[in-house]
Amino acid sequence: MTESFEPGTGRDGVDSYELEFGDQTMTGAERERLVSGRAETAERDDEAALRPKGLADFIGQPKVREQLSLVLDAAKARQKAPDHVLLSGPPGLGKTTLAMIVAHEMNSSLRVTSGPAVQHAGDLAAILSSLEEGEVLFIDEIHRMARAAEEMLYVAMEDFRVDVIVGKGPGATAIPLDLPQFTLVGATTRSGLLPAPLRDRFGFTALLDFYSSADLLTVLQRSARMLGIDSELAGLEEISTRSRGTPRIANRLLRRVRDWAQVRGSGIIDEEAATNALRVYEVDELGLDRLDRSVLQVLCKRFGGGPVGLGTLAVSVGEEADTVETVSEPYLVREGLISRTPRGRVATTAAWNHLKMQIPANYEF
């Protein structure tokens, strides 16, 4: 599956800071979670409107913006396609948006596909052979490409050539096909799964980190202005502190608070509206949602703080182990609420305090 569009045009399903592909790995619960950042059909217009067009509009990630700006400015000065770019980091931080910005800044079109969609070398060969001079190819979740396609990509990235195999068996012939100069932008949420030969062929790599509350507040102010939402600083600050350091989540919560303010409030997002709306959507002051709190409550109440294995913990909260491990656990660990140990997951003092529970006298951390 590939898509091609010119920079600055709309695209169905675009979130304000990232596109998503490869839903094959997601469970239904993940799609339904408010803070998962997944775009819904009814909000496509809003999301497309919020998407930054150039580096100057991109908020946060100052080091990445400066480094990428140097790469693009140098390429424009040489009048050549920029080096291949690898963007890694958690979902919702802007990897796809940066890929779109690369195409926009270079005044070229963007071809979009995903790792799970490239299951055969022939799939990749068809995409590469249709590229035009200077075009940007974006592969989301690039670590999930098939091995045969990865090996073809090595030569394409380095020599701008693919070898098309004609025939089968001993009579098969490899026909070299020259490719135009293009820029590959790869995005991954799990850079450790990328083979070293592939990772080393990227001329520029960037790791996107979670946003500070101040940066998220700037994102929310821009989004509210572009969506024509009446808001107060205190209301936006309340949303920013509950957004898990992720712009996509911040924009999604902004829209949900807007709904509450229009239906049950005065139409203005103030502190009271934000607090009441997020209570309805079960997002607490730390940004934890229902699943996050269920994990903490089971860990502390049923298992006395642990240690407990991931599989047992997942069954206890009624979710798949992959969902708990990839969706809920990373944020809980980052916030210091649970710890991973060789024996299993363990609740920290912060977890007991957040749940307002008494720490057992014999509990060992």
Image: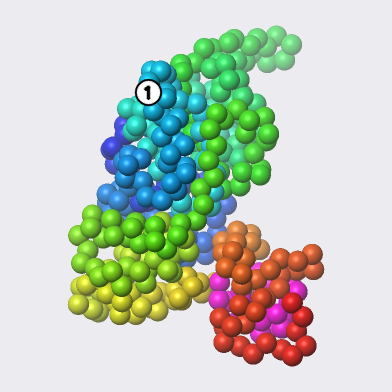
Q: Which residue is mark 1?
A: 76
| Image quarter (top left, top right, bottom left or bottom right) of the C terminus | bottom right
Residue 161 part of the magenta segment: no
Frontmost residue, 265 versus 74:
74
Tell me the residue at 71%/70% (across/down): 345
Identify whether 141 is placed above or below 136.
below
Residue 51 is situated, as x and y percent measured from the top left of the image, at: 32, 47
Task: Please state if 160 lies on the left or on the right of 238 as rendered.
Answer: right
Query: How crowded is the residue under tag 1: few (<14 C-alpha within 10 Å), some, or many (20+)?
Result: some
- The region drawn magenta spans 292-316
Identify whether 97 is placed above or below 276.
above
Q: Quadrant of residue 338?
A: bottom right
Tell me the residue at 59%/10% (across/down): 175
Frontmost residue, 323 versus 35:
35
Identify whether 168 is placed above or below 291.
above
Residue 183 is situated, as x and y percent measured from the top left of the image, at: 47, 26
Task: Please state if 107 lies on the left or on the right of 115 as rendered.
Answer: left
Residue 312 part of the magenta segment: yes
- Secondary structure beneath disc 1? helix
Q: Quadrant of residue 156?
A: top right
Frontmost residue, 73 versus 320:
73
Residue 53 is situated, as x and y percent measured from the top left of the image, at: 31, 41
Tell me the residue at 39%/57% (across/down): 215
Question: Is most of the magenta stretch helix, strand or loop?
Answer: helix
Tell me the residue at 61%/47% (across/down): 190
Instruction: Please say whether residue 111 is visible from this viewpoint.
Output: no
Task: Please state if 5 lies on the left or on the right of 93 as rendered.
Answer: left
Amino acid at the residue labelled 1: Lys
Q: What is the total number of numbered labels drawn onto the structure image?
A: 1
